[in-house]
Image (spheres, rainbow, N blue to C red):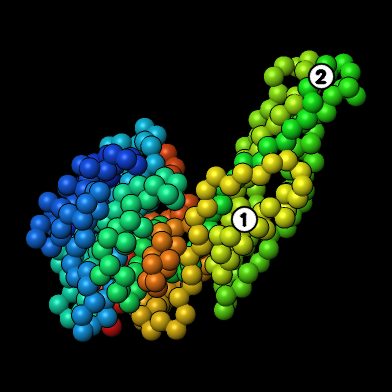
């Protein structure tokens, strides 16, 4: 039989799922979180909420962090409980994590040996420059005194360390238009692009090792467009690139590597560059967290707000009950047992 804690967590997550909070429309959910937490929380502006202890005192300060927003709905609202899961938009990414955060704040363990705070913020599912977390860290300097931040991204209750940087670019190839019956009088921009994309496709992942963790630097062509008609050799072809780079690589170094890979072919324009997130080293709270759940440790082969926290000088890791494979899917879901396990791991960690 499910425990009382599991029932409470499932009900909380379903309640959160049923409040739509697509990126840039998080106001209703932010108000709800404030109402639920009452005097434990405060409005930090821009639909950000701070709760619990958010300034370092005599004890280590641990922050739980979670984003309020979801991707657009795919006919997956309202949510439901089905076969031991909470099913619905955002269930895995990351209203499961938000539910665990809220329940720990409402009923914190009595024998905690650290101070516990929480950060709720909007617009994480948008490009890096739109996130509300970095501006929040700038206007709330006390948050930067935290000893460890746990970002409740979906990890299936594994500990995912660091995160990849995420660089987006546009690669434009130019040629000379002409009649497709006489292509030798023209210069086919699509053919130029094909040679460039073939070079990208031929690149093996580059492995970067931190302790026993291996991050893979990869570059992908993700969209391509060009051409005006079937009887016209095109003079322009545009390829969009996504480059993921490992911790320890700066945004500037990542841009230089991508430029070297593209070479002199085409015109490369950087559209956005979200930095990588550092792997914490020598932090006893990370060791304590691993021991609290006998956690499997893996590299985060994706981008998360760990990058924003580490850029602000805060050691941060990824740990949440949602399964990454269900994030952003039409059938998004989280196991109620995983909610309970996440809650139990964090309780043990907070109490040493």
The alpha-carbon separation of the residues under discs 2 and 1 comes to 34 Å
Residue at 61%, 44% in the rendered image: 269
Q: Residue at x 77, y 47 (%)?
A: 264
Q: Is residue 116 above or below residue 195?
A: below
Label disc, if present, on residue 140 of the rendered structure: none
Name the foreground residue: 117 vs 196: 196
Which structural element holds mark 2? strand
Residue 81 coordinates in the image, percent (x, y): 28, 46
Location of residue 342 in the rendering, given as x and y in whole percent from the top left corner: 32, 66
Residue 95 appearing in the image: no
In this image, 96 relative to 181: left or right?
left
Toward the viewer: 60 or 128? 128
Residue linked to disc 2: 178
Q: Is residue 204 visible?
A: yes
Q: Is residue 180 left or right of residue 171?
A: right
Question: Left or right: 195 with respect to 321?
Answer: right
Q: Residue 6 placed where, x, y %?
A: 24, 60
Q: Which residue is mark 1?
A: 255
Whichever of callouts 2 and 1 sits on the residue coming sooner in the sequence is: 2
**Crowd rating for badge 2 (residues with CA inside 10 Å; few <14, some 14–19, many 20+):** some
Reply above or below: 142 against 126.
below
User: For residue 186, which quarter of the picture?
Assistant: top right
Q: Locate residue 90 relative to residue 266 in the image: left or right.
A: left
Instruction: Please report the residue visible at 18 percent of the width from the left and 74 percent of the height from the top.
Output: 109
Residue pictured at 49% horizontal, 72% vertical = 279
């Amino acid at each position: 039989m499910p425990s009382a804690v599991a029932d409470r967590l499932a009900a909380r997550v379903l309640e959160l799922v049923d409040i739509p909070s697509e990126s840039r429309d998080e106001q209703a959910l932010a108000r709800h979180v404030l109402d639920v937490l009452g005097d434990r929380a405060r409005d930090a502006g821009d639909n950000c909420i701070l709760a619990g202890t958010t300034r370092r005192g005599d004890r280590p300060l641990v922050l739980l962090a979670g984003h309020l927003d979801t991707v657009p709905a795919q006919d997956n609202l309202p949510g439901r409980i089905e076969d031991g899961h909470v099913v619905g938009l955002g269930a895995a990414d990351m209203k499961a994590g938000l539910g665990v955060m809220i329940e720990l704040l409402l009923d914190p363990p009595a024998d905690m040996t650290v101070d516990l705070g929480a950060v709720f913020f909007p617009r994480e599912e948008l490009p890096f420059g739109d996130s509300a977390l970095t501006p929040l860290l700038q206007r709330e300097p006390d948050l930067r005194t935290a000893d460890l931040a746990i970002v409740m991204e979906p990890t299936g209750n594994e500990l995912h360390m660091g995160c990849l940087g995420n660089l987006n670019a546009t690669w434009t190839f130019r040629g000379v238009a002409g009649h497709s019956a006489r292509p030798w009088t023209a210069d086919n921009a699509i053919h130029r692009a094909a040679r460039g994309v073939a070079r990208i496709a031929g690149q093996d992942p580059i492995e970067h090792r931190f302790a026993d963790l291996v991050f893979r630097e990869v570059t992908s062509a993700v969209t391509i467009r060009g051409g005006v008609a079937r009887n016209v050799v095109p003079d322009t072809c545009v390829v969009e690139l996504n480059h993921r780079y490992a911790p320890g690589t700066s945004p500037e170094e990542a841009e230089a590597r991508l430029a070297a890979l593209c070479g002199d072919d085409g015109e490369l324009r950087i559209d956005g560059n979200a930095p990588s997130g550092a792997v914490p080293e020598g932090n006893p709270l990370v060791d304590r967290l691993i021991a609290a759940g006998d956690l499997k440790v893996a590299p985060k082969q994706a981008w998360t707000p760990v990058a924003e926290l580490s850029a602000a000088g805060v050691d941060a890791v990824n740990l949440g009950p949602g399964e990454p494979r269900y994030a952003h899917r039409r059938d998004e879901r989280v196991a109620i047992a995983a909610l309970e396990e996440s809650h139990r791991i964090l309780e043990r960690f907070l109490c040493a």
